[in-house]
Amino acid sequence: MNTDKNAMALYVRVVEAGSFSKAAAREGVPVSTVSRKIAELEKALGVRLLERSTRQLRMTEIGQGYFESCRRGLTEFEAADSLVTQRQVEISGRLRISIPPSMSDLAVVPLVSAFQQRYPKVTVHCLVTERYIDYIADGIDLSIRGGQPSHRDSSVVARTVAVQRPRLLASPGYLARIEPVTRPEDVAAHVQLAFARWERPLAWTLSRAHESVRIEPEPRLVLNDYAGVLQGLVDGRGVSELPSFLCQAALQQGRLVELLPEWRFASVKLSVAFPSNRNLSPLVRAFKDFCVSYFEAHPLA
């Protein structure tokens, strides 16, 4: 059987897009062409690959297996082509990345600026959000994320590019008004505001040598943006934790003080993530590799 490889590729695009119309728009062809090509592919194979309705598109059991095989084959073909052409392609174009709040000014903007100095023909668009990223629907090439990967898509690959350690902090003015905080158990009563995500209860673990203490504070103000926590701490609103790269200036200026420095939070990884089933363009690959070298030279901790 001599199956049309272009039709196989189009079938993969339809499944990834979730509809004939979206696949047609991304490929720049009429919907009728996409529908005809898939029908011809099913006829050549002698099987039904997709169940269609006015609102849904669902793979049959054999269609699922065929999709996985086609996707692997396409990835190998694209990787082979990429090896030949990558060094001949000038790094240019538009890069769309997703980044979490609180990182844009002190971490990501300097990173992107350094990248654009090396590749002046690159334009970068940043989506600042904590929400789940659908790489296809959101049009995102790569995301930068802190903490453990929370992607729902099992095909997402995350590569660690930096590590930072959160610190326990308060303003000198607040510390002057309270009894000394000498042990982790003293901390919870002074946590008035904190960073947290809505779906997770707030819990901290501080460790020293072979000893660990779990703290479950109940702050009156919870934010999913560290910038607000930083300002609140400087204003004297109790004790809380901040990423190391966010608090360095305030510590150096004496606006904040680190508490219990011998007790440590676990280090937090910063990763770049991208779909494993998508062959990386030279631009995306260049940015991913640049992130690794940049944070080696500019550590966050």
Image (cartoon, rainbow, N blue to C red):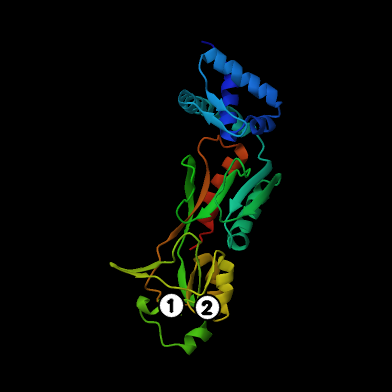
- Say which residue appears at 58% left-offset and 54% top-offset: 99
Name the residue nearer the viewer: 193 or 289: 193
Residue 259 got which mark? 1
Q: Could you say where residue 279 lies in the image, as x and y percent from the top left?
A: 55, 34
Helix, strand or loop for disc 2:
loop
| Quadrant assignment, res 29 | top right
Q: Which residue is mark 2?
A: 256
> In the shown orientation, is residue 173 left or right of residue 28?
left
- Say which residue appears at 58% left-offset and 60% top-offset: 103
Q: Could you say where residue 220 lies in the image, as x and y percent from the top left?
A: 51, 75
**Which residue in the rendered view is the most extreme toward the top?**
1
- As measured in the structure, the alpha-carbon distance from the residue carrying label 2 to the one carrying label 1 is 10 Å
The answer to whether residue 74 is seen in the rendering is: yes
- Say which residue appears at 68% left-offset and 43% top-offset: 94
Q: Could you say where residue 203 lies in the image, as x and y percent from the top left?
A: 41, 66
* 182 shown above or below 197: below
Kind of residue at disc 2: Leu
Q: Residues within 10 Å of mark 1 (few under 14, many from 20)?
A: many
**Which residue in the rendered view is the most extreme toward the left?**
210
* 109 shown above or below 284: below
